[in-house]
Amino acid sequence: MKVYAFDVDECLWTSRGPITEQMLRDLRVEGHVLGINGNLSAFLPRCEKWHEFISFTMNFDFGINPAYGLGLVPKAVWMHCFQHVAFPGADEYVMVGNVFGEKNSLGVVCGSHDNTAAAQAGWRFIKEDDFANGVR
């Protein structure tokens, strides 16, 4: 079983991204643990039944940290704490998100440093378009 943490903006269908709800639901059916590590205000209100396939949320938009995007706590810190404290038993930890400044397949410029956060936390990184195209 793997743990997947998804960024929202320019990543998920709720916020100009290529990853669909069905893709996430399919992962959950396979037995993986899924979470949101991104803009909760752009996800939770736009996905009515999110609780059916999302097991955790790790990021909150309470302030601005220019090095890591919105949120008082950098994504890498959330990811590290989750992996080592809340859920230490997974086979693999995967962050799915953006590379800052690159355009996704929908032509939207991505605004998150998710690849950097994944590297800092020791998680494997999958770019949003690669995930949408089947990379797991």
Image (spheres, rainbow, N blue to C red):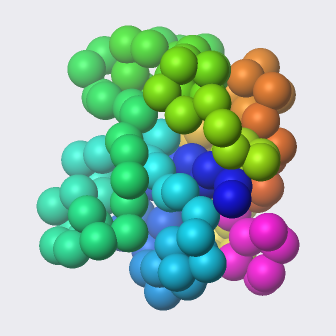
The location of residue 132, given as percent across then percent down, is 69, 77
Q: Quadrant of the C terminus?
A: bottom right
Which is nearer the eye, 112 or 80?
A: 80
Which is nearer the eye, 95 or 72?
A: 95
The magenta-colored residue range is 128-136
Whether 65 is drawn above or below 87: the answer is: above
Whether 136 is drawn above or below 29: the answer is: above
The location of residue 111, given as percent across then percent down, is 58, 42
72 sits to left or right of 48: right
Q: In which quarter of the image is the N terminus?
A: bottom right
Image quadrant in which you'd find residue 122 = top right
**Residue at 61% in and 53% down:** 4
The location of residue 83, given as percent across then percent down, is 62, 28
**Residue at 23% in and 57% down:** 44
**Residue at 44% in and 14% down:** 73
Q: Is residue 32 visible to us here? A: yes
Whether 25 is drawn above or below 38: the answer is: below
Q: Is residue 115 visible to us here? A: no
The location of residue 125, given as percent across then percent down, is 79, 46
44 sits to left or right of 30: left
